[in-house]
Image: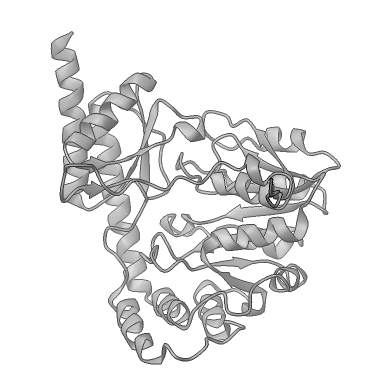
Amino acid sequence: MTKLPKPQPGIMDIRLYESGASKVDGIDNVVKLSSNENPLGPSEKATEAYVRAGHSLNRYPNTDHQSLRFAIGEVHGLDPERIICGVGSDEIINFICQAYAGPRDEVIYTEHGFSMYKISARAAGATPVEVPERERVVDVDAILRAVTGKTKVVFIANPANPTGTMVGQKELARLARELPGNVVLVLDGAYAEYVEGFDGGASLVDRHPNVVMTRTFSKIYGLGGLRIGWGYAQREVVDVLNRIRGPFNLSTTQLAVAEAAVRDRAHVEKCRTENARLRAWMAEALAEHGVPSDTSCANFVLARFTDENEAEAVDNYLKANGIIVRRVSGYKLPHCLRITVGDEPSCRRVAHLIGAFKGSVADAG
């Protein structure tokens, strides 16, 4: 019998990432509120850059991403030489695990943390270590207690996905200060742009050589379909990560569109303002129907139901009415549904349907 190749230890322990559903059998024109996509889409300037890029598809992209790095640096007030670009922030996360963690090492992530942290840790041969949160908020003391001599990386999403909660700046600063210097602290700022005046952790990167910030163009910039992300760290860390980055990891199209997007500050502000308005409205509307949620700092609301059965029943009811939201049982939140803040008609429709479901249950009782 022919033997099959054997994968590296840890690979077969990885659970495949499950993306948000996008269709319901038998129903056309569904409203997708399962993947935290920007309902306003990319800016017109980004779309124009996409069209222009189509005229040079025969050309290789530059390998140092200089123009995009300088644009990001200019907009955010950062040193472009300390910026690295990747295929979404996921690739930066992979680089960090590949570069700094391996067999017999440990990678810390929090109870409801983004599933890619655990996947990337296992792919590097490291052991993922889960620490508890406190009422769906990252617990800095729990993280510090979990640190051992084997710890190499700590991942925190701020704002967090799928909870939408944030860790305060003082607590983050304390974590960065008290972590051993040989442990990389990764501040995942995928949703940072939705928080007015928040730097995503850039100031901590400037003060601590072991802190890395990651960001993405998939959320507020509306470019999820192009997969573009970036990271900010000390030059020595960026040098390490660039040594394992593929030279042509981003296409000419990705680079051109991302640069146009990051420079269009008016579009970003419009998206932030509209998201904040509808997020507050939807959270209040759900609360009036007896469905609480934590204060969200992202572009979604984590709706909490009585138990897993009710969450499943509401999810099925929404699907039957052409609305797709996200079950988050895999994040140890079986009684919750994560609902993306869509456009106004979508927000009103999902709130109305949840209210109708709760009302029908009450009437039946």
* Spot occupied by residue 317 in the image (x, y as percentages of width and height): 21, 30
Image colouring = one colour
In this rendering, would 177 be left or right of 305? Answer: right
Q: Which of 361 and 144 is in front in this view?
A: 361
Q: Which of 207 and 123 is in front in this view?
A: 123
* Spot occupied by residue 19 in the image (x, y as percentages of width and height): 42, 48
Task: Name the image quarter holding the N terminus.
Answer: top right
Residue at far right of view = 149
> Can residue 104 be seen by looking at this rendering?
yes
* Spot occupied by residue 344 in the image (x, y as percentages of width and height): 19, 50
Q: Residue 200 lies in what quarter of the image?
A: bottom right
* Spot occupied by residue 151 in the image (x, y as percentages of width and height): 79, 44
> Can residue 170 be seen by looking at this rendering?
no
Q: Which of 8 and 4 is in front in this view?
A: 4
Residue at far front of view = 1
Q: Which residue is drawn at 23% across and 28% down?
A: 288
Task: Name the image quarter holding the C terminus.
Answer: top left
As drawn, 121 above or below 312: below
Q: Residue 271 lies in what quarter of the image?
A: bottom left
Q: Residue at x 64, y 58 (%)?
A: 94
Q: Residue 44 lies in what quarter of the image?
A: bottom left
In this rendering, would 131 be left or right of 43? Answer: right
